[in-house]
Image: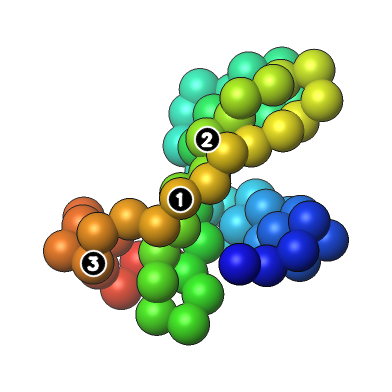
Amino acid sequence: MADAEELTGWLREAIEKGNVGAPFEGAYPRYVWSRKEGVVYEGRLVNQELGQYKGYPLRPEGWWGDLL
């Protein structure tokens, strides 16, 4: 798995591209999505004060298709 700096970059990239899901909790979106090497990952906000996310890969047959 990627290191913390790389994962933070994935989050920033996903937010900049608008790959986010409402609602926002404070300054952060509740969900973010990123595709890396053919795998779609979902990040879920777990600490809105610190902007911390928990991430996990999603099943390949999900709704996102070619969106990400």
Q: Amino acid at mark 1?
A: Tyr
Looking at this view, name the residue that lies furthest to the bottom.
Answer: 37
* Element type where label 3 sits in the image: loop
Q: Is label 2 or label 1 in front?
A: 1
Q: Position of residue 52 (x, y in %)?
A: 72, 33
Residue at image mark 2: 44
Q: Which residue is mark 1?
A: 56
Q: Is residue 9 visible?
A: no
Q: Amino acid at mark 2?
A: Arg
Q: Residue at x 46, y 50 (%)?
A: 56
Q: Residue 2: where, in percent of width, then height?
A: 68, 67
Residue 12 visible from this viewpoint: yes
Q: Which one is closest to the eye, mark 3 or mark 1?
A: 1
- Residue at image mark 3: 60
Q: In the rendered structure, are the residues bearing label 2 and label 1 in contact, judged by CB atoms less than 8 Å apart?
A: no
Q: Amino acid at mark 3?
A: Pro
